[in-house]
Amino acid sequence: MSDTPPEGTPRADGPPTGEDEGHTLAYGHSLRHPAPRGGQNRADAAAAEGPPGPEGQKGGSRPDRGGRTALERKFARLGWGFALPGLLVVLAVTLFPIAFSVAMSLSNVDVSAGGFRLSGFTTGHYGLLLGSERWRYAVLFTVLYTIGTVLAELVLGTLIALVLERLGGAGRSWMMALLLLPWAMITVVSAQLWAYMYNGVYGILTSASENLTGEPVQFLGTRFPAIISMAVADIWKTTPFVAIIVLAGLMMLPKDVTEAARVDGADAWTAFWRVRLPLLRPALTIAVLFRILQAFGIFDLPFVLTGGGPGNATESLALLGWQVMFTNLDFGPGAAVAASTAALVLVGCLLFLRAFRSQVGEEEAGT
Amino acid sequence: MRIGHTRLRLTWTHLAALAIAAFVAAPLYWMAASSFKGPDEIGANPPDLWPKSATWDNYRQAFSDNNFGTYLLNSVAVSIVATILVLSLSAFAGYALARLPLRGKGPIMVALLMISLFPTIALAAPLFLLMRDIGWLNSYQGLILVYTALNVPFAVWILRNFFLGIPKEMEEVAWVDGASPVRTVLSVILPQARPGMFTAAIFTFTACWTEFLIALTLNTADRFRTMPVGLALFGSQFTVPYGTIFAAATVSVLPIALLVLVFRRAVVSGLTAGAVKG
């Protein structure tokens, strides 16, 4: 889409990123004094010649110390004017609270009816965390649950995408619409729905399992069935999302590559595994990244479906953090749980991105 | 026989597609069917696959005896206002990041991506304390502000990608004709970026519509609850009135389902926006 020159292209001037190729030069008018039509000032000449290339000496006034002309500075100001409202809202509501949260996890917090105070630096909350069996279990559970569900969704989603790609036509279009429904559904709704289907007395899945095995399965009654049942509910809701991304990726692949592989004697399986899958990598990377982040912060599903139980079998980090903060009102330890969640997410994403050298951001791995 | 072979393969594809459709649709059918069942049928074992004596009682229960109507309106109001705010902020920010010579664009984009992917639980406590201090717990504006901030980053990404794909000639003409920057964006750029605006709108609306953690934390008073919170906290420890819940749930699925079906192309292009070069 973009025509970004690779990072590090030497530029005589202008901003470090190369998206705008100096084309703003063409807009060389003081807006208050539009030149008469046909008036030939430098900017009109520039406009007539088309945008100068990145190395072209920019028209306008003398460059400042940063090598930017007055005109460029004006457009930079305009750019900040456009970007700041949005950025400030984001800053105020996310970055500031994140910083505050970290500070809170490192202080003694006194919460009273009149407000709360941070007093004194302490690493005690983290010490408490590391020593806590419950936190260690929540970390283990969240990590394994994330890996398990994302892997299952990736495999299932790719299979579904392959089926739909072959289906083609109106059928595919309708199937895509159907797949979007679970994605757009309120997670709490799907959690309530699965809770009803898993219900130990009158759940339809419980009675189906009784018909199959002669013995009703208590899906949410004990640790491992509960974890698997929750994962199934999760997979039902989120696999469609993965399938649609992969399907879109498949539809963008050049046809001739696969055909060439087939002509060279590769069977369908090899052609997929060796030729198409590597080409799909960008789409898969994006899908997996999104899913890792969502799965790691999972909260609504266990909150409604299992309440974190039985015992604390399905207690994710987010659920634990919420319980500690809002049920026990232990803001310090709760903030430490939340900060540890965020830290683990960041580490997980960085590891994943390093492993897959994705093309998020400015370094394009080529599409 | 090649032809027979292809035909056979097609049938397998159709069968597989049917199985997938059944797996996706069955729980949805079960939700809708259960919403028309009376209490006896809801608790029947074995369950009836089809409501024997369909009734609208659950819908009456949910919307006249209970506050699901209020929750629904709260959700609609908060989601729509937040979506409008997100679009107006992101359109200008996205344009600046796509076209204007800002320093540090790369880091800004990466920071936005990081923020849009941050686990919400890390924000819950500080936002709760912040809102308590400014008196915005149990209000619409508190939730709207948070939803706006949480969704601007992703919307900026989507819109910036769209802006990068728009040819520059038209805006250059507008500039040369002396249109003000704001007018150029509003009357020249945005009309061309309409698909991108739709995509960003659907994504933001869906995210606000389904958000649970922040709504649960900030708005504890019944009058300000949104649909997800109302649905999660309905019932007691011992009895969960599933009929009423599914009636409300079915109603909550309808608007978003319509939206997604009508604009499904926008959704799909949004889902893949990250996967294309941008």
Image (cartoon, rainbow, N blue to C red):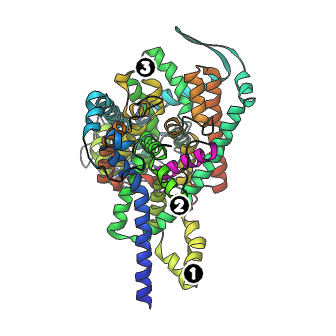
Contact flag, marks 2 and 3 (Cβ < 8 Å):
no
Spatial separation of the CA atoms under disc 2 and disc 1: 22 Å
Label 2: how many Cα within 10 Å (few below 14, some 14–19, many 20+): some
Residue at image coords 38%, 59%: A176
Looking at the rendered structure, the secondary structure element under dot 2 is helix
User: Disc 2 marks which residue?
Assistant: A156
A48 left or right of A274?
A: left
In magenta, the rendered stretch is: A221-238
**Which comes sooner in the sequence, label 2 or label 1?**
2
Q: In this view, does B41 lie to the left or right of A76?
A: left
Tag shown at residue A267? 1
Q: Which amino acid does label 1 sit on?
A: Asp
Which chain does tag 3 point to? B
Q: Nearer the viewer, residue A310 or A30?
A: A310
User: Residue under circle 3?
Assistant: B137
> Distance from label 2 to label 3 (Cα)?
42 Å
The residue that appears at 48% across and 26% down in the rendered structure is B217
Residue at mark 2: chain: A
User: From this viewpoint, is residue A185 visible?
Assistant: yes
> Can you say whether B120 is above or below B220 in the image?
below
Q: Quadrant of residue A36?
A: top left
Is A105 above or below relative to B97? above
**Front disc: 2 or 1:** 2
Residue B211 versus residue A206 in the image, above or below:
above
Principal SS element in the magenta part?
A: helix
Q: Position of residue A312 (x, y in %)?
A: 63, 35
Q: Which amino acid does label 3 sit on?
A: Leu
Whether residue A96 is visible here, answered yes or no, is no
> Where's the N terminus of chain B, which quadrant?
bottom left
What residue sits 42% from the left and 56% below the top? B24
B60 inside magenta stretch:
no
Give the mark toward the camera: 2 or 3: 2
